[in-house]
Image (cartoon, rainbow, N blue to C red):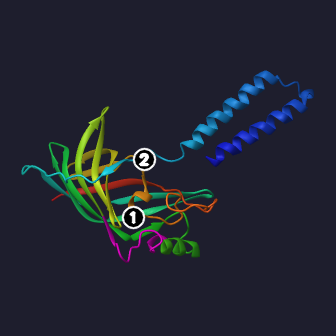
Amino acid sequence: MSLTFFYIFLGKYILIFAIQNNKYHINMKTSFFKIFALIAIVAFSSCKEKADEAETSAAEEAAVAEATAVIYKAVTDKSTIEWKGFKPTGSHNGTIAIANGAISVNDGNIESGKFVIDMASIAVTDIPVEDEGNASLKGHLTSADFFDVATYPQATFEVTGLKTINGQAVLSGNLTLKDATNNISFPVSTNMEGNTMILKSETFTIDRSKWNVKYGSKSFFDNLGDKFINDDIELTINLIAEKA
């Protein structure tokens, strides 16, 4: 949202410049509407920098597959979760590995599944590995300030259901992170290629404060000024699974 204010102020000074320089024969009425139309478009775009938040609610009972379901096991070296975090001065992004997991499918529909996420595998990809800042950020993310990996080395996602909304498949499941579990729902697409299942989520966000990840969060601390870190974390799930 800070970009929005920047563009509003920019537009203001462009107009002042235009008014003060009539010698360029600028059509002021036309220029006014063009400039503010541009500002409105850019401002709206800046408000939509992050993906939509996953629908989040209390944990639900895990789904149980029929006996006829086919099990697909995660190919861990080909599956990953992409993450992106935000702060007033920019963002950072990286990946987290899926340690293991399986998904049960019946007639092409996901019936159940559970995945274990290796929190120690958090990697930073927007800072070169050889830079000191890479190890520093990874160390901070895995520390007690954020995900406290020493205490909570794993996170889990357990499927609670799959439904179709306006032609879009929406996967729901209990996400356990640190000492909290919440149910989240997000759009996914699946593709079957022989004995391989490919599942990809749309990019979505979760509110880290709902999993007690408190560092720099306005949900827990006042008077942070511009030193806060956004609660929203963007996630994109890329799963490759092979028929067991």
Q: Residue 33, located in which quarter of the rendered image?
A: top right
Please tell me which residue lies in front, 124 or 6. Answer: 6
In the image, what residue type sits under mark 1? Ile
- Element under disc 1: strand
Residue 18: quadrant of the picture: top right
Looking at numbered disc 2 in the image, what kind of residue is underneath it? Answer: Glu
In-image side of 7 versus 78 (left or right): right
The quarter of the image holding the C terminus is: bottom left
Position of 194 with respect to 97 (left or right) is left
Residue, disc 1: 96
Alpha carbon distance from label 1 to label 2? 19 Å
Measured from the top left, where is residue 6 in percent x and y? 70, 45
Whether the magenta-drawn stretch holds residue 144 is answered as: yes
User: Reading the chain from its start, which is encountered first: label 1 or label 2?
Assistant: 2
The span shown in magenta is 141-155
Q: Is residue 78 above or below residue 29?
A: below
Q: Say which residue appears at 32% left-offset and 49% top-offset.
A: 57
Main SS, magenta region, reads: loop
Residue identified by numbered label 2: 53
Find out whether residue 213 is within the magenta segment. no
